[in-house]
């Protein structure tokens, strides 16, 4: 199991989720992907992507500066 990190700060919809989709092709079962994004719609978008793709969204939280941090298990 490996943890990967994706910095999607400064990217706007749909780019953060597209970057996740590209990285997903490299992920192995059990791997984790941590994403940091500041796109306003990212929390909703990543939740929908995980549901559609059958991946486990462990959490997605937005801090006081509007940055979202999410973790997905593959």
Image (cartoon, helix red, strand yellow):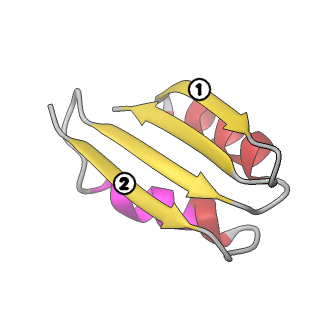
Please give the residue where the numbered disc 1 appears in the rendered image.
Answer: 59
Above or below — where is 15 with respect to 4?
below
Residue at 36 percent of width and 54 percent of height: 5
Packing grade of label 2 (10 A; few <14, some 14-19, many >=20) is few
Q: What kind of element bears circle 1? A: strand
Q: Residue furthest front?
A: 64
Above or below — where is 74 with respect to 7?
above
Which quadrant of the structure image shows residue 49? top right
Instruction: Quarter of the image for the N terminus: give it.
Output: top left
| Front one among 21 and 67 | 67
22 falls in the magenta region: yes
Please give the residue where the numbered disc 2 appears in the rendered image.
Answer: 5
Q: Where is residue 23 drawn, in percent x and y?
A: 36, 59
Residue at 25 percent of width and 47 percent of height: 27
Q: Where is residue 71 drawn, in percent x and y?
A: 48, 35
Residue at 61 percent of width and 64 percent of height: 16
What label does residue 35 carry, if any? Answer: none
Residue 42 is left or right of residue 25, and the answer is: right
Label 1 near label 2: C-beta < 8 Å? no
Q: Where is residue 8 drawn, in percent x and y?
A: 56, 67
- Span of residues in magenta: 18-25
């Amino acid at each position: 199991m490996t943890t990967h990190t994706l910095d999607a700060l400064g990217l706007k919809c749909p780019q953060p989720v597209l970057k996740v989709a590209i990285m997903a092709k490299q992920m192995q079962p059990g791997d984790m992907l941590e994403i940091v994004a500041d796109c306003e719609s990212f929390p909703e978008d990543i939740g929908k992507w995980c549901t559609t793709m059958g991946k486990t969204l462990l959490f997605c939280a937005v801090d006081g500066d509007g940055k979202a941090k999410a973790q997905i298990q593959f």
